[in-house]
Image: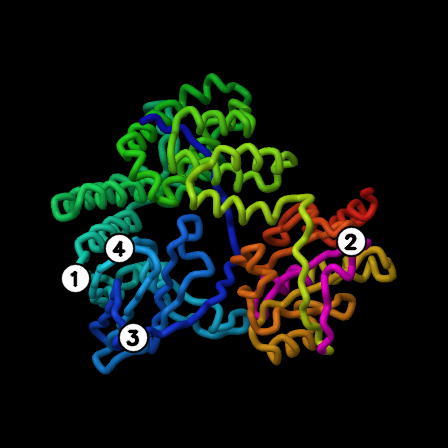
Amino acid sequence: MTFKLILSTAIFCTFHAFLYAQEKPDAPARFTVHVQFTEPLGIDSLYLRINNRFFSVIVGNEQVIAAGKDANNGFTFRIRPDQSAGQFDIRRKAKRNSSQDAELVSMPFVLAQPWQSEDSIVIRVSKRPLDYFSGSFPYQYEMKFSGKGARRYQARYDARIAYYEAGFASSNSRLFDSAGARYQDPAREKIHAALSILELHKSKISLSDYQLIKADILAENFKSRYNALRFALPQQTDTAALARSSGPLASEMDSLIASVPEHIAQQSFDFIRFLACKLEFDNQFATAKTDQQIDLVIKHYQGPLRDRLLTVLVQNRRSDPRINELYERVDRLVMDQDSKTELRKMAATLTGIDARDFELQDAGGNMVRLSEFKGKVVFIDVWFTGCGACAHYYKNVLKSAEQQLDGDDQIVFVTVSADTQKKLWLKSLSTENYTGGHSINTYTMGEGLKHDWTAYYDFESLPKMLIIDKKGRLHRIFNNGLDKAISTSQQLVSTLNEVKAMK
């Protein structure tokens, strides 16, 4: 099949609302994992996160199951998921420090893995030698898999290790092959190393498992790869010369991509985002409009793969002035249920839609409704204790903006804390590290991000900022404080005054 492409980028200061659950030992399990350490490592608990939603692969709202250490230095998870397949990973709590809440922040231990119903695996974990360099926690350990389905897990793990250990070309001199006068994929060595290891496992696993692991290898680090290439390309308008030097790169990538069947490609979230990234990269010099990119996807893809690519494409255009129009076009085309669910979630965040009302408690115990402020512009800052980015935004932007607009009765500042403990929230209010006296400060009454209001907007990371116009409609949601419209106190004041002036 012919693959043409798209760019998907999203950087999050991640905040997970964990729901810890411990299965009863005698409960019938459809999926079991036992982690066995060969030596004590000072870890008393591990947490397995499992998610069945295609567009939310281990990023929030997942089921989290805790396992304590047994007498033999092992941890056992017995899971009864709603679906027959999905993704899981295993994490450990981070060490508590001044900027992290150990109940909310965790470190990866076993990276995300697809699971299937009736899998029953044992992961034997041993510490790598001290001379093995790794800046990533999961790669400091060696893992051996056994049990039902273990060959599939071992193949993926070994390929991932080979990918990690191979070199990544980030400098322009390595990205451009002067002898061949062409650009090359910065992860070329990594991909070939991982595929070589995967070939050794090919006879031991099913063809579909082999193809899915291959798809994920090709998609690995898609954002870093294309960012490196984008910065390496010369800043010139000679598109013909660029086409000649980047053409072989595109051809090589297309050749690899074409080896992945559509029915496999549609199962890999990362591969779909990789295709999205490639599409935008291929078209960055052709000045292709979003409508044209949608046309390309419709022309070259079909079924769930087409629908999921279209969904990713419109997700990547959230800041496009025509986002409502683009959304409506894609929404009419999409038939895949996972894509429809994701688009319905996205609809809640579109500019001009009525903002979701809330009723939250303030520090004095009074109930505050968002609808009370209709007729005024409302700036909402959503934060939690321990969020460094939240504190940074208040200190460097929001605090000054509130002071500058003090006395303007047409603009209201509201904060919503996702802290799950009222005492912790009140203590943070007293420090004025996250908010101050110029705001109406509320919290989600112990429900964290699982509160009806935050769940409606599907907040999977914080901080989040919202601007509500005078008619009670959503003007915009900001994923963080980096957007130009609110990145400085002066710009935030200007943006709020512009919204106030709207008819």
C-alpha span from label 3 to label 1: 21 Å
C-alpha span from label 1 to label 2: 59 Å
- The mark nearer the N terminus, 2 or 3, is 3
Q: Nearer the viewer, residue 316 or 492?
A: 316
Q: Nearer the viewer, mark 1 or mark 2?
A: 2
Give the answer, above or below, for where 302 lies relative to 433.
above
**Tag on residue 377?**
2
Report the residue at 66% width, 59% height from top: 393
Query: Outermost residue toward the left?
Result: 203
- The mark nearer the N terminus, 4 or 3, is 3
The residue under label 1 is which amino acid type?
A: Ser
Give the answer, above or below, for where 392 lies relative to 490.
below
| Quarter the N terminus occupies | top left
Query: Of helix, strand and loop, which one carries label 1?
Result: strand
Visible residue check, residue 100: yes
Location of residue 229 in the rendering, given as x and y in whole percent from the top left corner: 44, 35
Q: Nearer the viewer, mark 2 or mark 3?
A: 2
Q: Which residue is mark 1?
A: 146
The residue under label 4 is which amino acid type?
A: Gln
Look at the numbered discs 2 and 4 and tell me whether their residues touch, using CB distance below 8 Å.
no
C-alpha span from label 4 to label 3: 29 Å
Q: Which residue is mark 4?
A: 116
Location of residue 67 in the rendering, given as x and y in whole percent from the top left corner: 32, 74
- The mark nearer the N terminus, 1 or 4, is 4
Report the residue at 48% width, 47% height from top: 341
Q: Which residue is mark 3?
A: 41
Q: Residues within 10 Å of mark 4 (few under 14, many from 20)?
A: some
| Quarter the C terminus occupies | top right
Q: Residues within 10 Å of mark 2 (few under 14, many from 20)?
A: many
Query: Outermost residue toward the top?
Result: 240
